[in-house]
Image: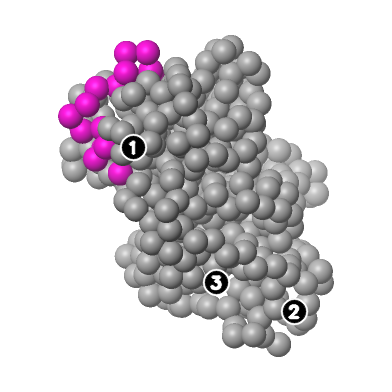
Amino acid sequence: MAMTLAQKILQKHSSDQVKEAGQIVRARTSMVLANDITAPLSIDSFRKMGAKKVFDREKVALVCDHFTPNKDIDSAEQVKKVREFAKEMDVVHYYEGGNVGVEHALLPELGLVGPGDIVVGADSHTCTYGGLGAFATGMGSTDIAAAMALGETWFKVPETIKVNISGQHDKYITSKDLILHLIGLIGVDGALYRALEFTGPVISDMEVEGRMTMANMAIEAGGKVGLFPADAKTVDYCRSNGFANPEEIYPDEGAVYCREVNIDVTGMAPQIACPHLPDNVKSVDELINIRLDQVVLGSCTNGRISDLRQAAEIIKGHKVHKDVRFIVLPATPKIYEQALDEGLLSIFIKAGAIVGPPTCGPCLGGHMGILAAGEKCLATTNRNFKGRMGSLESEVYLGSPIVAAASAVAGEIIHPARM
């Protein structure tokens, strides 16, 4: 049987024969992930099921990135619970304090996930690793508890939507614009429990960090996974980060897809997701006089070094608008250090930005960037649900690092070409 990427990876980890979409298969996990919000629930379930040890102390990652540095007593207690569990289970990959980064930027950087892996995490944006050719998906904390104990879980083999992206785009278009355009096209439930498989010349030319940005937001279209072929670029990226023996992975010729979506990026303008859903997408040129109170650059979607470079190139020599709080959060300590060495942080600070530590913070309305009633924010994050970043009366717009930097200077959402 000719297989899609999703089917091929599931087959690699299952003793069941993968025959068709909709089939239930058991599969071995390569990595199981939880964070400081979701891990405590998983730990409780782990105890209740009578488990005594995690299945493999090197294949469980606990990353305290959401409410850290601890914002209050409750978050401190959450992290304490995770820390003590990690010590008890002798978990190798526990991250807190100076070594913690936003989980979906940190794990690829550490070489803990890669092509052909099955990764499950108690966080919906676990699908990020599909940018590396991994079948990676979010699950509830109870399912994650079982995976931590057993090292396996079950999946319904998803149907796959093939997304072919072609054409020539200008310098202001990024991978964030492409995924926002797709979500606007098919809707927030357009890929419900389906795999999104990306292909085409634009994808082949795209760097790995851009692919992870797109895979990260597959869930915003309802996708079970967002998958990219693991090509030579992927192998080089993973090998350079210490992932053991990465191999190229491609779908088979003749694989069956439930739908094909063709996107031509020629002439595309930067895309903005407007309140209050990721599929309420408009061209930046359609948005006139949207004044901003805050701009956020960071998150598991767009906090990588390439994102910071793009934003710094735009904002260099300019000043952040007097009415705007521009918050810059490098996604990991390594990215922070690299941005420091390259002078990017100096560019942001001289422009009047607030540079903070690696944290999910404002993305989920946790801390370090909460919105008051009536405030508007443009963020490079992945969700703009009502009340996502603070008050139910605030508004969140989603855009690329390039648009974010330009808009921070202008004080309103603008096309970067107007800088």
Q: How far separated are the C-alphas under marks 1 and 3?
A: 38 Å
Q: Quadrant of residue 260?
A: bottom right
The residue that mark 3 highlights is: 116
Residue type, mark 3 in image: Gly
Secondary structure state at the residue bearing disc 1 = helix
Give the residues in magenta.
Answer: 310-325
* Label 2 environment density (alpha carbons within 10 Å; few <14, some 14–19, many ≥20): many
Q: How far separated are the C-alphas under marks 3 and 2?
A: 15 Å
**How far across and down, in percent of the image, does residue 91 sit?**
54, 51
Secondary structure state at the residue bearing disc 2 = loop
Residue 290 lies left or right of residue 403; in this view the side is: right
Residue 52 in the image: above or below residue 271:
below
**How far across and down, in percent of the image, does residue 104 sit?**
49, 49
Q: In the rendered image, which quarter contains the N terminus?
A: bottom right
Q: Is residue 54 magenta?
A: no
Residue 173 lies left or right of residue 311; in this view the side is: right
The numbered dot on residue 416 is 1
Q: Earlier in the sequence, mark 2 or mark 1?
A: 2
Q: Spot the residue most to the bottom.
A: 1
Residue type, mark 1 in image: Pro
**How far across and down, in percent of the image, does residue 358 sit?**
40, 35
Secondary structure state at the residue bearing disc 3 = loop
Q: How far separated are the C-alphas under marks 2 and 1?
A: 47 Å
Residue 25 in the image: above or below residue 103:
below
What residue is rendered at 48% in x and 70% in y?
Answer: 200
Residue 15 seen in the figure: yes
Q: Earlier in the sequence, mark 1 or mark 3?
A: 3
Residue type, mark 2 in image: Val
Mark in front: 1 vs 3: 1
The residue that mark 2 highlights is: 18
Q: Earlier in the sequence, mark 3 or mark 2?
A: 2
Q: Nearer the viewer, residue 310 or 7?
A: 310
